[in-house]
Amino acid sequence: MTETVVLKLGGSVITDKSGECAIDHARLREIAAHLAARGAAALVLVHGAGSCGHPEARRYRIGDGLTGENVPGIYETHAAVSRLNAAVVGSLRDAGVEAIGIHPLDLGLAEGGRLVSFETRHIVEMTEHGIVPVLHGDVVMDRLQGSCIVSGDQLVTRLAVELSSRRVGLATDVPGVLQNGSVVPRIDRENVATLDIGGSGKTDVTGGMRGKIMELLELADAGIESHIFHVSKIDRFLDDTGHGGTTIGRDAP
C-alpha cells in the first residue's frame, strides 16, 4: 500500500486574510497543477479557513461555545469554510485530480476544543482508490461547550496518526518558522521555549504560528515529523529533495 501524504495548505496561502472570503483562485490553479503532475501518490489534503471562516467564527464567538444567541454562527461559519472548500476541490478537479470535499462538522465531535471522535476509515478507502479527500478547518459540535473551532492543524495531527503517515507537510506564505528573520531549521520540545513565535497578524481564531507548532509537537510526540515550508516548495517536499523550511520533530539526541 502506498504511504499516504498529508499536506495542508495554509489559509493565508489560498485567501487574502485581510478581506472576507477573498479566495485566491490563481494560486489554487497553480497548486492544483503541481499536485496533478504527481497523481501517483496517495494524498490527503487539508486547508485552513483564511478569510473564509475566521471572521464569522470571531463575530459569533464560536470558540467560546454556544450561548443561544450565537447558534446561527454555526451555519455562517460552516457555510463560509464550505465555500472555500468547494473552490479548492473545483480547482483540483479542473486540473484532473479526483478530489472530494470532506466536512469535519459532519463527522467530528470535540470535547473542550479537542477532537474526541473523528471517522477516518472512509478516508483510507478513498486514498486506496485514487481519490484525494480535501478537508478543512471547521466548526464542530463540542460535548462540553456546544461548539468549537477545529483548526486545519489539529486535523493534520489527527489524520497523520490515524493514517500512519510519515510524510506531513504544511505549505505556508512564509519560508518556515522565522526567528529574527531567519528560518529555524528544526523545532523540538527542547528548543521551542527559546523561540519568540507570535500569532497571526490577521484575523485568526486558531492560534497562528504558535498554535501550529504546538499541534505539530503533539505529532512529534507520536514519532511523526512534520515540515513547514513556503508554498512554492510543494514540489520539493513531495519529491523529498529539501524544502529549506522548518522540521518539527522529537528532541534531538
Image (tube, helix red, strand yellow):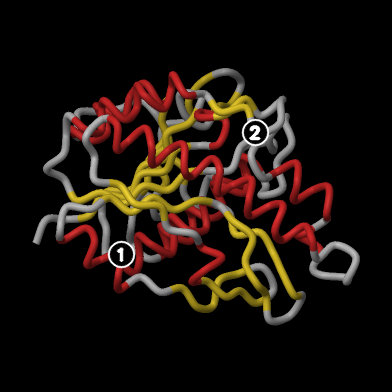
Name the residue furthest bottom.
143
- Provide residue 130's location: percent of width, then percent of height: 16, 52
Residue 123, numbered label: 1
Near-viewer residue (179 or 213): 213
The image shows residue 118 at horizontal and vertical percentages of 46, 73
Residue for point 49% across, 71% down? 107
- Name the residue at 37% across, 49% down: 252
Residue 122 left/right relative to 246: left
Question: First in sequence: mark 1 or mark 2?
Answer: 2
- Element carrying mark 2: loop
Q: Residue 104 vs residue 241: left or right?
A: right
Residue 89 pos. (x, y %): 38, 42
**Quadrant of res 210:** top right
Residue 126 lies, in percent from the top left, at: 24, 61
Q: Is residue 3 left or right of residue 189?
A: left
Q: Which residue is mark 2?
A: 21
Please state which amino acid type lies under the numbered disc 2: Cys
Q: CA distance from mark 1 to mark 2?
A: 27 Å
